[in-house]
Image (cartoon, grey):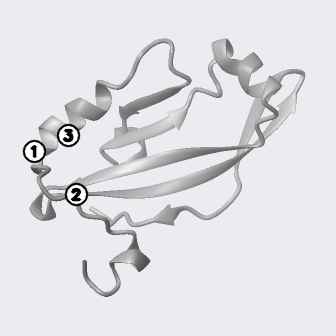
Amino acid sequence: MKLFDWLIGYKPAPKGVDRQSTATLRNDLLAINRKTAPFVVRDGKPEGVDLVAEWKIVDARWYELFAKAGLQKVFKVLMKFDPSNCEVRVVDQEWSVEWRAGVPTLALSARPRGQLSEP
């Protein structure tokens, strides 16, 4: 571990864990999706990244669950692969949730945090 790795959020894989190709990692992350999960990992091209992981808060099937839980914040994780360094760079976006008649309204509530280099 380098001196400032903790500051930039760098965490290497544990010893004995082989690095995966970008294609394998992408497929593995997309494979965690299922209809019964309250989250989704999806293509991130609209956001200019490789993948996005987010809660399904705007999905009508999940309104009631999230509303009953009194959810006030949700996060969106933007992921960009860096094959040359065998890394995934991420930015977390925090969104505030306001409930109106049981329907969520989202607003970006804080500056994104994380490390995502420009293409």
Q: At numbered mark 2, what does the secondary structure look like: helix, strand or loop?
A: loop
Left or right relative to 71: residue 41? left
Disc 3 marks which amino acid?
Answer: Leu
Circle 2 or circle 3, nearest the eye: 2
The vertical placement of 117 against 83, above or below, is below
Disc 1 marks which amino acid?
Answer: Ser
Labels 1 and 2 touching (C-beta < 8 A): no
Few, some or many residues within 10 Å of mark 1 (<14, 14–19, 20+): few
Quarter occupied by residue 27: top left
Labels 3 and 1 touching (C-beta < 8 A): yes
Position in image of residue 51 (x %, y %): 34, 41
Where is mark 1, residue-wise? 21
Left or right relative to 21: residue 96? right
Q: What's the distance in space between the residues labelled 3 and 1, CA to CA?
A: 6 Å
Quick one: label 2 or label 3, which is nearer the N terminus? 2
Position in image of residue 8 (x %, y %): 39, 75
Position in image of residue 40 (x %, y %): 46, 28
